[in-house]
Amino acid sequence: MENKLSILRKIIPDELEVLYRRYKLLKGIQFHQPVGRRNISNHLKISEKIVRREVEFLKNEHYLNVSASGMTITKQGKMLINDLEDIINDLEGLNNLQKKVQALLNCQKVIIVAGNADDDPYVKQYIGKAAGQELLTRSQHNSIVALTGGSTVYHVVNSIRETSSLSNLLVVPARGSLRTHVEYQANTLAALLAHKLNADYQLLNIPDNLSRKALESIRKEPEIHGVIDMILIADVLLFGIGNALEMADIRNLSDTVADFLIRRKAVGEALGYYFNKDGESVYTSRSIGIKLEQMLHLSYSIAVAGGANKAHAIISVRELFKKGCLVIDEGAAHEIIRILEH
C-alpha cells in the first residue's frame, strides 16, 4: 500500500491535496454541525473562498445539506467519510503509526488522530470523537460504563450524540471528586453521558483528599458501597491520562506531596495514582473509587490523552490500558516512539 501511495503522490499531488481538503471539510462539518461557512473556515484554517467552492461541490454531490441554520452531513456524506477514513489514514501514515505504537506499548488497540493537542486545542475534540465512537462500539445492552473526570474525557462525552439504542445501561463515576471545574468532574460527566445514552447513573459525592479515617467511614455507607460494587464490575472504563505534577497542582496537593512526587520521579497520573517512568505507582491520592489492582482486571479500558507532552505519562500507565484501547494524537504518538526507541 505504501508503494502505491508513494506513486500516487508523484503522479497526482494536486488531486491528493483536493482529497485531503474535502475529507477534512466533511469531518469538520460533521463535528461542528450545524455550522456556517465562516465558522468552519475559522475552525479548519481554510479560506472562505475555498470553503465556498468545496461546499458547492459537496452539496451538488449530495454529501452536504445547506440551510439557514448551517451545513450538515447527509447520510451519503457519512458513508463517504467512513469509506475514506482508512485511505486518508494510510495517506497520512496513521495506520502504520498506530501499529508501531501498539507494538511498543504492547496493548490491544491504538487509535491515533491527526495533529498535536499541544499546538491545536481542537485536536482534543477529535480525540474525544474517536474515543466516543470506541465507547459506543464497546457498550452493549446491560453494560456498566465507568469514567473519570478531566478535560479530555469531557470532550469524549461531549462528542457523543443522544441515542436510545442501548437498553439497561448504567453509568458510574470511577472515583469520587468535588474539584474546582464542575464541568470536568466525574459525577457531572457520568450524569451527562447517562442522559445522552438514555441510561441510569449513580454518583459518588465525595471530595478528594479527606482523611483516611473519614474515607473509611464514608466507604461503609450502603449507598457509597453500592456504587463501588458497580464500578468493580464495569464492562468499560474510560479514563484520562495526566502529567503527574500538573495533576498534583490541579488537585491542590500540598507542596510536601509535590516535592515527594519530584523525588520519586513521578511522570504520569491516572485515577489518582501517580507513576514513575517504569510504570511503578509511587503515590496514591486519598479518594474513594476503583483501586489500581482492580483496574487491571476490568474487561476493557479506554485511555485518552493528547499532546506530545503527555508521552512520558502515557508510557508510565500503559499497564492500565493493556487490555483495551489508547486514543491519542500524532504528537503523542511520535514522541512515544522517540522515547521508547531510544
Image (cartoon, rainbow, N blue to C red):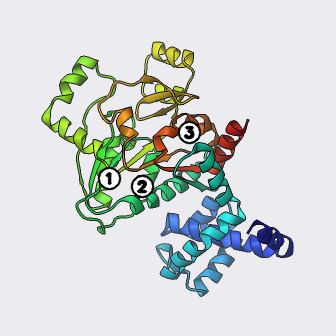
Question: In the rendering, at what x and y percent does residue 137 appear?
Answer: 41, 63
Instruction: Sort mark 1 into few (<14), some (14-19) or many (20+) by Cα contacts within 10 Å.
Output: many
Q: Quadrant of residue 186?
A: top left
User: Measuring 51% from the left and 51% from the top, which residue is drawn there?
Assistant: 108
User: Measuring 33% from the left and 52% from the top, which residue is drawn there?
Assistant: 235
| Side (left or right) of 30 relative to 251 | right
- Quadrant in the picture for the N terminus: bottom right
Q: Which of the two labelled residues, at mark 1 and mark 3, occupies the earlier sequence position?
A: 1
Task: Say whether residue 120 is visible.
Answer: no
Q: Which of the two labelled residues, at mark 2 and mark 3, occupies the earlier sequence position?
A: 2
Vertical relation: 130 (above or below) 293: below
Cβ atoms at labels 2 and 1 below 8 Å apart: yes
Instruction: Sort mark 3 into few (<14), some (14-19) or many (20+) by Cα contacts within 10 Å.
Output: many
The residue carrying mark 1 is 192
| Side (left or right) of 126 relative to 141 | right
Which mark, residue 309?
none
User: Measuring 62% from the left and 48% from the top, which residue is drawn there?
Assistant: 103
| Side (left or right) of 9 relative to 197 | right
Question: In the rendering, at what x and y percent does residue 177 appear?
Answer: 32, 34
Which mark, residue 314?
3
Which mark, residue 158?
2
Mark 2 to mark 3 CA distance (whole Å): 23 Å
In this view, the mark in front (2 or 3)? 3
Of the residues shown, which amino acid type is indicated by label 3?
A: Ile
Question: In the rendering, at what x and y percent does residue 248 appear?
Answer: 47, 25
